[in-house]
């Protein structure tokens, strides 16, 4: 088998779980849970260039804000290198929200970029919430590395450091060291932030 093709295939488990657009015909469930913030995503990739998604968000610290939206994610650009790859994504979603004081329409817009190899993983994402004539930003950045390299059908593990800033939820960046594991089509992450909050993510793709 061509060595370049083999490298790309071995990157597929990472791509399938962490990207807004995965392989054509793939479906994904993703849930991220913290004591005062929950996010759920259901997605179906109709093309290697775009996917359809449903999102639900809940932020207890922002007046018990919650929303439900549907929309599309797009792969803007992919760079395939000999032993790594990089990607640039965007997405636009719309729906409804409610909080302790009001309810109405909401829109989401995000941009996300990442670079990864078999050993290193980096990601940055900025997401904008537009509702009630106002905007709120959510910033997330990650760096991770694999302490060992496993095969596609073996348990894989990553050590990840995540920084997250949610406007109006806190004036501080929430730093969360976490462990990421995935086996075949299931990924899970567990962590504990510097602010004393536990973190759990579960992703399954079909």
Image: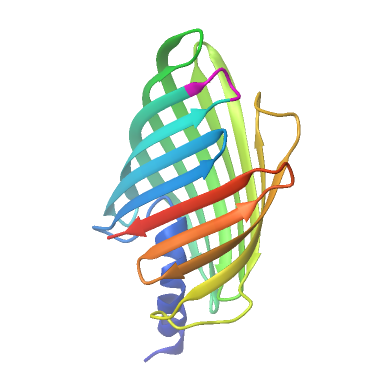
Q: Name the residue at 65% across, 49% down.
A: 141
Location of the N terminus (image quadrant): bottom left
The magenta segment: 61-65
Q: Nearer the viewer, residue 114 or 33?
A: 33
Q: Name the residue at 43% across, 60% down.
A: 17
Name above or below for residue 191 compared with residue 37.
below
Name above or below for residue 24 compared with residue 199.
below
Name above or below for residue 169 compared with residue 80.
above
Q: How is the image coloured?
A: rainbow
Q: Nearer the viewer, residue 101 or 112?
A: 101
Q: Is residue 191 left or right of residue 20?
A: right
Q: Position of residue 206 (x, y in %)?
A: 27, 60
Q: Position of residue 199 (x, y in %)?
A: 57, 48
Q: Quadrant of residue 182?
A: bottom left
Q: Position of residue 203 (x, y in %)?
A: 40, 55
Q: Quadrant of residue 107?
A: top left
> Which secondary structure dominates the residues rendered in magenta?
loop
Q: Name the residue at 45% across, 24% down.
A: 66
């Amino acid at each position: 088998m061509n060595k370049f093709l083999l490298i790309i295939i071995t990157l597929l488990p990472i791509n399938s779980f962490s990207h807004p657009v995965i392989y054509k015909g793939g479906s994904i469930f993703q849930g991220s849970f913290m004591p005062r913030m929950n996010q759920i995503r259901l997605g179906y990739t109709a093309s290697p260039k775009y996917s359809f998604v449903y999102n639900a968000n809940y932020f207890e610290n922002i007046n018990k804000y919650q929303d439900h939206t549907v929309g599309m994610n797009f792969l803007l650009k992919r760079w395939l290198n000999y032993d790594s790859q990089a990607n640039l994504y965007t997405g636009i979603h719309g729906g409804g929200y409610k909080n302790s004081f009001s309810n109405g329409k909401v829109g989401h817009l995000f941009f996300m970029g990442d670079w990864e190899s078999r050993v290193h993983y980096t990601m940055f994402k900025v997401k904008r919430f537009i509702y009630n004539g106002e905007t709120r930003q959510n910033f997330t950045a990650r760096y991770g590395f694999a302490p060992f390299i496993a095969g596609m059908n073996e348990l894989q593990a990553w050590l990840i450091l995540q920084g997250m800033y949610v406007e109006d939820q806190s004036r501080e960046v929430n730093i969360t060291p976490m462990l990421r594991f995935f086996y075949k089509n299931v990924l899970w992450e567990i962590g504990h932030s510097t602010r004393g909050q536990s973190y759990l993510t579960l992703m399954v793709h079909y």
